Amino acid sequence: MAARTDQTGDPKLLEQLLQARRGTAFFARKLNELTDADLDGASLLPGWTRRHVAAHIGYNARAIARLIDWAATGVETPMYASPEARNQEIEFGATLSPIALRNLFDHSAVHLNVEWRDLPPDAWHHKVKTAQGRVVPAEETVWMRTREVWVHAVDLDSGATFEDIPAPVLERLLKDITTAWATRGTDAGLLVRVSGQEARQESGDSRADGPVAVSGRLAGVVQWATGRGTTGVTATERSAPLDEIPAAPKWI
């Protein structure tokens, strides 16, 4: 019997699905490198253990699968009943036994993958609503999941770094973040510069008089922009180095 494949034939979407699946496999590998006792340790996210991160990724897959079901059936099925319900779900998941927590991740990831695989081509354009209230086409769920699995694999603090994240994912993530800052106006007086690539990238408040410029290679800049450290970046003001790297504005 031939293996079942994605119903969509859109090459761009198929490439995005591949990146999400690679990220899921990467998260799985970093999770499996942790012993059951390690799960009790702190993650890189304040107030969250590794258990919280694993539970969040498991329940996130279920939530995104609900959006795919919405796109397929037309029946509105929100990601979460409420922000409070989402938080309670994660807190509950963090109390599960290690085997149950690992099964939550494995089973939810398989379920989401099947939902993506079986979604008819036209349904990828059907509109759904994210937990933040944004109305987006179902194809946006692929990026939503991609971002979660790659970044939170680093948050497990089991050896992954932003250098492990593929450049296309980092580039899109940085664009999302800087666009959010610009929309809110929280990037006033701030320039972000990415070096080490064929074309130098710059975003932020280019009209500011003497802006603070945060610079570095792509992985380091994205790590800083997501609020996860300043390794590999420098900051200057009027071309003079700053002793401290300023904190990045909030992006979520």
Image (cartoon, rainbow, N blue to C red):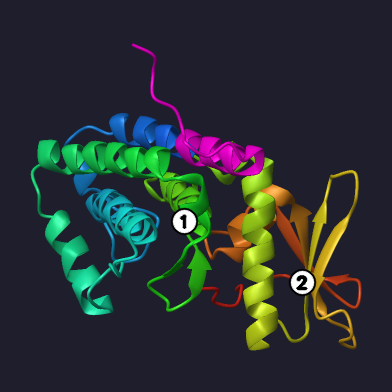
Q: Which residues are magenta?
A: 1-22
Vertical arrangement, residue 187 with respect to residue 235, above or below: below
Residue 244 visible at all: no
Vertical arrangement, residue 244 with respect to residue 197, above or below: below
Residue beneath the point at 71% across and 57% down: 233
| C-alpha gap between disc 2 and disc 1 | 39 Å
Q: Nearer the viewer, residue 113 or 197?
A: 113
Q: Which residue is mark 2?
A: 242
Q: Which residue is mark 1?
A: 141
Looking at the picture, which amino acid does disc 2 mark?
Answer: Leu
Q: Nearer the viewer, residue 212 or 78?
A: 78
Furthest residue toward top: 1
Residue 236 visible at all: yes
Dividing the image into 4 quarters, which one contains the N terminus? top left
Tell me which corner region of the image, top left, top right, bottom left or bottom right, holds residue 236: bottom right
Horizontal and vertical percent position of residue 65: 32, 53
Residue beneath the point at 25% across and 44% down: 108
